[in-house]
Image (spheres, rainbow, N blue to C red):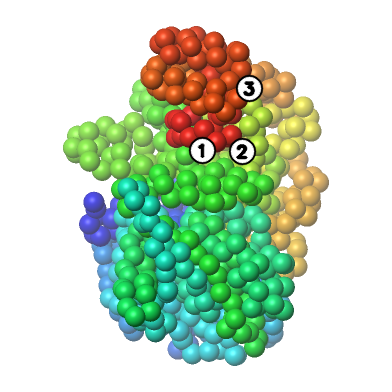
Amino acid sequence: MRTLEEFQTEFFNQVVLHANATGTLLEDAFFELALGEVVEAGDIETADRAHFFTEGTRPIRVDGYGGDPGIEDGTLTLIVLDFTQSADLEALDQRRLLAAFNRLQRFLEHSLQKSFRDDLEESTPAFGLCDLIAQRWQSVRRVRMLLVTNKRLATRIDGLKAEDFDQRQVMYSVWDASRFHKLEEARGHEEIEVDFPARFGAGLPALAATVPGASYRAYLTVVPGEQLADIYNQWGARLLEQNVRAFLQARGKVNRGLKNTLEHKPEMFLAYNNGITATAKEVETETGPEGLRITKLKNLQIVNGGQTTASVHAASLRPNSNLDAVFVQMKLSVIDSAIAADVVPRIAEYANSQNKVNAADFFSNHPFHVRVEGCSRRITAPSVEGSFKRTKWFYERARGQYQDARGNLTPAKRLAFDAEYPRAQMFVKTDLAKFINTWRGLPHVVSSGAQKNFVAFAEYVAREWDRDDTQFSDQFFRDTISKAILFRRTERIVSEQPWYQGGYRANIVVYSIAKLVYDAGQRALALDLGKIWQDQALSPRVEAQLATAAKVINGVITATSGNVTEYAKREACWTRVRDADVPWPTALAQELSTAAAERARELEGKKDQVVLNGIEAQSMVIKQGGPFWQEVRDWAYDNHELTEKDSGIIRDAIGGFVSDKQALVLVTSLRRYQSRGCHLGLGLV
């Protein structure tokens, strides 16, 4: 486990590496990496850069915001940074802390003044944010001021209420070096501790429902609506297990039926609603004259019932709200930390199985992510020109894998690991979603933020995997790395342009790539992903075309009135960019492939994957052993699922040998059995 000081040094090095790779300032790189962690943790749903500051006796500053308050439950989140360009761990005292919030408060005050807005350049992110605040102010219910720093805060004040502003509740929140460090140690799930007697005056009446011999404890309870709303108001989406959070974003936060019941029949909410399913790492209880009560929960996570929770919270924010008659039933499972990583996702998966899009599609253990991870550990990239060193691209399927892989090595082996898997060639699930959805022509979706884009990506992958998993082959992995190289190089190209003055780089990058792919397709051409993979770089002509497209696109997206960042999240923006005229030099075709040639490469990759699938299935079937397959046969026979074909193949599996083709059939059959109630082999296929 790394110390706070070691974590600080490593994180600062990542910021420097990211700044060098993208050609951005260190502070911009810190915003992107640090706020990415905050979004991943569920503290906010998105983070958009909008930097503005003035000096003087009453300085003003803002660095970003957490999305349109009109679609964020009426919450306006304003972000301010306090970044030190040093790997040393510095302290943030109370005076500087309050000074940072005061600068942010002044920005909010000035943004509501027309004279201040009129003095700003309309094409800047600061004007867009001011305009958004002014337009949405009547629907804003509360303001959250978020300070993000790589310093260490002496005292924790997360959730501290400030003085109300214009009859809106204002809350302070801080992410400092210590909090980022704890988040890493908790593998991205920041621990939440709810002390019911301290917070609400009494514990929750509960009924123990633990099954003897089970590896977990269970309780049934009913949570008052006011308490559930208060808990969500404090911790927000951090309460929601990550995959449920993603599913909730995909479906919208407030269900109309829930809203109507809360407004017109609050006393019937318990009768009409299915309640919530939750997990906790630890629970404290007490038994008194009134029976068993839950007094404290540690690491509370809601794995089903996100819409219920968000709807109750939204109701509490309405004027003259009254949740006295609202109660929500809760099934609580207390899961030991040793098995939490495996059990919690399964609870969420089964609890959400009634949804049209299975919650399992969002989990890191989906077979797609497992396959990409396997490719990343197996496939070596070609050496770049002028070097004989061969490297790999590390896919972090589950949070912390990269650090874990190198953390326990000797110094010499760590150097060897870093040479084989350079940190610059590490990518995570949200990166993967950006690369592929940009290529698919969805720059407006990518611009909506990492989490919402990942939801769209997960739905696409789940659908395509079920249709034909062989398309996700070794060739697919190599092409994905080519798209990663294209994406990361375009980031630097945009930063290096003389016309680029800062702001909207993320939007310009995704729209430039999508436009290049689209324009090539209109000419029956395609980027030569095989060449990019072989060179591990883009050709000068492709880079020049991206620079040309970026300049045109910058003009298109900034020509809109109002907030450019929010406009870039709309499909209408993509339509305008797609129809824009970007010069297309004749010589560029020499650097491209044809659409037909790229389809042929994909087909070859699928053929290779069919063979690989068979080999993997054969190995797995034999590894399970004869007694296992005898149990499977008995279950299938007893439940009238055993076909004549299955019976013959299972007989061979019991005997210890099946061909690769037979193994593929057997794995498919076992999955069918599992979908119909067979629990044999869960987690293995």
Residue at (34% x, 84% y) in the render: 95
The residue that disc 3 covers is 602
Kind of element beneath mark 2: helix
The alpha-carbon separation of the residues under discs 3 and 2 comes to: 19 Å
Mark earlier in primary sequence (1, 3) = 1
Q: What residue type is labelled 1?
A: His
Q: Write down the quadrant of residue 125 in the picture.
A: bottom right
Identify which residue, 94 or 155, lies in the foreground: 155
Q: Is residue 255 left or right of residue 202?
A: right
Task: Return the residue at label 1.
Answer: 366
Q: Mark 2 points at which residue?
A: 462
Q: Which of marks 3 and 2 is in front?
A: 2
Q: Which residue is drawn at 51% across and 83% down?
A: 170
Within 10 Å of disc 1 (Cα), the crowding (few <14, some 14-19, many 20+) is: some
Residues at marks 1 and 3, CA–CA distance in whole angstroms: 22 Å
Which residue corresponds to the image point at 65% horizontal and 37% vertical from the top-left?
463
Which amino acid, by three-letter code, is at mark 3?
Glu
| 272 sits left or right of 339 in the view | right
Q: Residue 531 carries which label?
A: none
Of label 3 and label 2, which has the lower sequence position?
2
Query: Is residue 63 among the parts visible in the rendering?
Result: no
The answer for how far apart the CA atoms under marks 2 and 1 are is 9 Å
Identify which residue, 87 or 44, lies in the foreground. Answer: 44
Q: Position of residue 8 (x, y in %)?
A: 29, 58
